[in-house]
Image (cartoon, grey):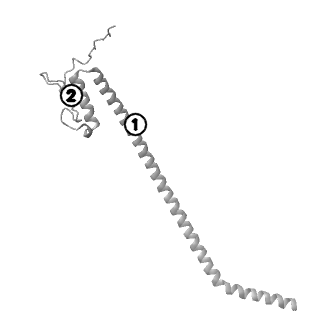
Amino acid sequence: MTPSFKPRNNRYKHIRSRYLPLNKTPTYQINSDNTSSDGKNLKEMSIKELCDEIYRVAIKKREDVIFDLHKEICTKYEDILKDNYKTITDLQEQTKSMEDKIKNDKHIIDDLVEDSENQITELENKLKTSIKQYPNYIRQMILLISKTIYLQNA
């Protein structure tokens, strides 16, 4: 039983790219030391540079699978960027609302402190006046008691 291999239909064989030289070059390989065709270290490349590198490989190899993989990676990367941007925007809005709430609470606290200080000064003033008037009240009470006793004896 012989395996039946379907010849691949290369959809992108008509694509011309700036990455393809006009003359034939040997097959493209990523070196075993994790460097790209430009000699850059793959671990130090950004996502954008890695996507470009996959695109170069797809064009040079004329591989549909690699090109589709490149498109899928780019799509997912863009989706992740959109989600992250939305999350950042939401967090910024939450931060703004929390800052507004903190400012509002600070104003409320300041008003409460001012009111309590006013009440304290008012009560201190009342206490001072009552202390000043205390001897007068004592004298008046003594006079009233003495008048009451005088009226009872008379």
| Position of 43 relative to 122 (above/below) | above
- For label 2, the crowd category at 10 Å Cα-Cα, with few meaning under 14, some 14 to 19 and many 20 or more, is few
In terms of secondary structure, where does tag 1 sit? helix
Which residue is located at x 28 percent, y 12 percent?
7
- Which amino acid is tagged 2? Gln
Tell me: 60 left or right of 128: left
Q: Tag 1 or tag 2, which sits nearer the N-term?
A: 2
The residue mark sitting in front, 2 or 1, is: 2
Which residue is located at x 25 percent, y 24 percent?
58
Residue 94 position, x and y percent, is 45, 46
Residue 137: name its quadrant.
Answer: bottom right
Which residue is tagged 1?
83
Tell me: 62 left or right of 76: left
Q: Residue furthest left?
A: 23
Tell me: 58 left or right of 105: left
Q: Nearer the viewer, residue 17 or 102?
A: 17
Give residue 38's mark. Answer: none
**Quadrant of the image for the C terminus?**
bottom right
Q: How many marks?
A: 2
Residue 150 position, x and y percent, is 83, 91
Which residue is tagged 2?
29
Which residue is located at x 41 percent, y 41 percent?
87
Residue 149: name its quadrant.
Answer: bottom right
Q: Nearer the viewer, residue 145 or 111?
A: 111
Is there a contact, CB below 8 Å, between mark 2 and mark 1?
A: no
| Position of 1 relative to 87 (above/below) | above
- Which amino acid is tagged 1? Asp
Tell me: 104 left or right of 21: right
**Quadrant of the image for the N terminus?**
top left
